[in-house]
């Protein structure tokens, strides 16, 4: 090849390179523009739904807003402010049982008929069994129906102009209330009741009431609606994906309200602990207390608060007065039910075996603000608990995964100092790609010659939508590891925390503010350093048939009680419970005579059974027989589940068919302490699209050039 040919080829190559760059940019921008156009078109459609609706809440300029609020832009350039829901909560605690009444008032301050849709959280163990719709002085009770049938009843009543309400489960800790045909200037109150047990750990008794659904990261590729949800589109900001097929149902719009209270909530608690109280505190809200003559406490929030962080009430018994066992019973429909709580004896000896300790920290955008500070403090505390014979590693994740070391290293002073520096530089940002981090943490066992206890501490807010996929991953890759979840922030995903720890044969805890770090991490490491009560079994005479839930009793760590629910035609007079503390056998006999009576026991038994069947449903590729079993139990005990819903219908039509019905999608608050600038998303960045276009065209030109040169 001559010099002239070489020069021509070089010039041609540079020219092609420039053309390739320009085409790449244009293609990338065209793709981005198409996606943006689709988003704007969708926004325009949504705006049309509420066009000229909020006559009493229209603002002409965004600067007129006194606080951050969700608004819908209208065709005339004005903005409609998102409505809110007022909530009142009454918690009645009697010993280890808690009955909660939740009243949600939907107010229509417009001149048009409205349908309100509100996504809200409840405790992951809540057993919802009653629904009432209150219109003025009239109260209409809801019925339990299979989910599709309940939705059909609701849609027919809505189309007929009848007042109607529907409560559906999206996750065990996330629900949706829909209320149709709210008259202009009117309000409708939806009353929901549920049962739950008090949480017991060491000498602490507590109840937790979640107030807000935090924005969830939605991984996966966008898909069309599945058959299960094809008849009704969700009201969320996310599209359904192959990993989260119901994403549009679990992503309510969000407001950031600083100066005024959006979705106000008030809480009243009646606490009859059953023993002399030593201390009663609310971890994250100011309360006032009144002690009645019988020792019962009346507890209220000092003021109405925005629904933006979990409420947690904790109480302790005076020394030596905390119950070590409890029994509640109920007879219903010819069956006998029992709930047994038993606290195993404390083990004072400490595990001396060397540990391989893997810390996993969530550094995604949802952790920005106070959450990342709490997580880093907790991780630094954990580093301080390492012993010289331990090995450790740190894994951080957001859009991608990174680890401090390629494999766990011994906790020498030098390695620990490197770890402290690594943690100090951690910053929050990006998506929440949790699966690769979990897989790396559970699959990177170093398998040293000597036996090591492998423990994984997972620090996250759990703000993801693909929980079931993650549970399956944990089951597949757990091996000999134990997974401990630490929920971070003001509104962690308790469903993920509890079930991930359960599948991981570990324990879970929560850190809600900086002041919690030392206490909660100390308690966690106490659990991790003491023997675990394993292989727990219920021993009953062969002649007696008892259905127990959970069927497989999870391992218990120091301070955790054993909680069982039982059902039989005739319960035995006593049961025997046995297990292993390390290699040491443990056994205790528990009498089923006497005990307290409670109408809640059968409901709690059914809730535990549904929970167990749902685990089976996830792990058996959604077997239809298991689904049928869940529906049967839920209908028999009047419970909301993944496949059953509560629906209430007023028989008298109030809206004429000629009058249009508009939709109000109630926005949630941003969780307290969050500072993320945008919602989690899975869209491909424009810069990446440009790069992909550039590489594709460049490759094509190179192939063409090779053919010319030949």
Image (tube, grey):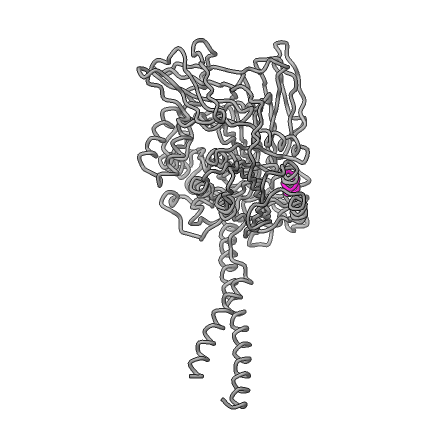
From the viewer's perspective, is 651 left or right of 119? Answer: left
Q: Is residue 649 visible?
A: no
Which percent across, then down, holds residue 334? 34, 14
What residue sits 53% from the left and 66% below the top?
A: 690
Quarter of the figure with residue 530: top right
From the viewer's perspective, is 154 left or right of 437? Answer: left
What residue sits 46% from the left and 35% below the top?
A: 503
Magenta-highlighted residues: 372-378
Which percent across, then down, holds residue 99? 51, 21
Q: Is residue 403 visible?
A: yes
Which percent across, then down, holds residue 524? 59, 31
Quarter the C terminus occupies: bottom left
Which percent across, then down, holds residue 398? 56, 49
Q: Is residue 451 above or below residue 538?
A: below
Q: Is residue 34 magenta?
A: no
The one nearer the camera, 443 or 707, is 443
Q: Is residue 232 above or below residue 709?
A: above
Quarter of the figure with residue 367: top right
Q: Is residue 375 magenta?
A: yes
């Amino acid at each position: 090849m001559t010099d002239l040919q070489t020069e021509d080829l070089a010039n041609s190559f540079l020219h092609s390179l420039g053309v390739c760059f320009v085409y790449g940019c244009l293609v990338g921008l065209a793709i981005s523009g198409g996606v943006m156009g689709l988003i704007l078109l969708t926004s325009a459609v949504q705006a049309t739904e509420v066009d000229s609706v909020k006559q009493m809440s229209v603002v002409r300029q965004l600067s007129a807003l006194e606080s951050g609020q969700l608004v819908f832009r209208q065709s005339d350039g004005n903005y409609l402010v998102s409505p809110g829901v007022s909530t009142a909560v009454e918690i009645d605690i009697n010993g280890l049982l808690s009955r909660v009444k939740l009243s949600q008032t939907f107010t229509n301050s417009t001149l048009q008929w409205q349908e309100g849709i509100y996504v809200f959280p409840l405790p992951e163990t809540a057993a919802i069994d009653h629904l009432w719709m209150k219109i003025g002085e009239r109260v209409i009770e809801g019925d339990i129906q299979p989910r599709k049938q309940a939705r059909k009843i609701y849609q027919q009543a809505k189309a007929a102009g009848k007042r109607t309400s529907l409560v559906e489960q999206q996750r065990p800790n996330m629900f949706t209330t829909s209320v149709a045909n709210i008259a202009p200037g009117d309000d409708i109150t939806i009353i929901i009741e549920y049962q739950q047990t008090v949480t017991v750990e060491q000498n602490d008794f507590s109840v937790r009431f979640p107030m807000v659904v935090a924005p969830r990261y939605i991984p996966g590729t966008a898909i069309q609606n599945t058959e299960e949800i094809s008849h009704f589109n969700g009201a969320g900001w996310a599209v359904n994906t192959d990993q989260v097929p119901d994403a549009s149902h679990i992503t309510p719009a969000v407001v950031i309200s600083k100066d005024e209270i959006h979705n106000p909530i008030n809480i009243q608690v009646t606490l009859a602990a059953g023993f002399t109280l030593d201390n009663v505190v609310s971890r994250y809200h100011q309360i006032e207390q009144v002690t009645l003559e019988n020792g019962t406490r009346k507890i209220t929030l000092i003021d109405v608060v925005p629904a933006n962080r979990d409420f947690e009430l904790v109480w302790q018994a005076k020394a030596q007065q905390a119950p070590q066992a409890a029994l509640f019973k109920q007879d219903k429909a010819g069956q006998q039910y029992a709930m047994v709580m038993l606290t195993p004896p404390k083990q004072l000896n400490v595990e001396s075996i060397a540990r391989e300790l893997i810390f996993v920290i969530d550094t995604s955008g949802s952790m920005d603000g106070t959450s990342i500070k709490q997580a880093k403090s907790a991780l630094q505390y954990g580093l301080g608990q390492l012993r010289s014979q331990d090995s450790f590693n740190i894994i951080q994740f957001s859009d991608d995964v990174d680890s401090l070391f390629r494999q766990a290293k011994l906790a020498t002073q030098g390695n620990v100092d490197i770890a402290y520096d690594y943690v100090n530089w951690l910053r929050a940002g990006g998506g929440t790609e949790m699966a690769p981090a979990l897989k790396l943490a559970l699959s990177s066992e170093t398998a040293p010659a000597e036996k090591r206890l492998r423990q994984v501490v997972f620090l996250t807010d759990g703000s993801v939508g693909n929980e079931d996929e993650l549970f399956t991953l944990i089951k597949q890759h757990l091996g000999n590891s134990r997974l401990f979840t630490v929920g971070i922030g003001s509104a962690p995903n308790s469903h993920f925390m509890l079930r991930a720890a359960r599948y991981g044969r570990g324990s879970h805890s929560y850190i809600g503010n900086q002041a919690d770090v030392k206490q909660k991490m100390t308690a966690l490491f106490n659990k991790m350093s003491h023997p675990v009560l394993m292989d727990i079994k219920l021993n009953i005479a062969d002649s007696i048939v008892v259905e127990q839930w959970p069927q497989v009793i999870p391992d218990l760590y120091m301070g955790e009680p054993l909680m069982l629910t039982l059902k039989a035609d005739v319960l035995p007079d006593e049961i025997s419970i046995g297990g292993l503390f390390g290699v040491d056998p443990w056994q205790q006999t528990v009498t089923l005579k006497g005990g307290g009576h409670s109408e809640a026991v059968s409901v709690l038994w059914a809730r535990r059974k549904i929970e167990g069947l749902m685990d089976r449903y996830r792990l058996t590729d959604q077997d239809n027989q298991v689904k049928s079993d869940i529906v049967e139990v839920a209908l028999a005990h009047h419970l909301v589940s993944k496949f059953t819903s509560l629906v209430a219908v007023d028989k008298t039509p109030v809206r004429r068919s000629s009058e249009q019905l508009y939709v109000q999608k109630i926005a949630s608050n941003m969780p307290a302490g969050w500072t993320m600038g945008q919602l989690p998303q899975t869209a491909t960045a424009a810069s990446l699209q440009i790069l992909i276009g550039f590489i594709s065209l460049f490759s094509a030109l190179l192939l063409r050039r090779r053919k010319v040169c030949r």
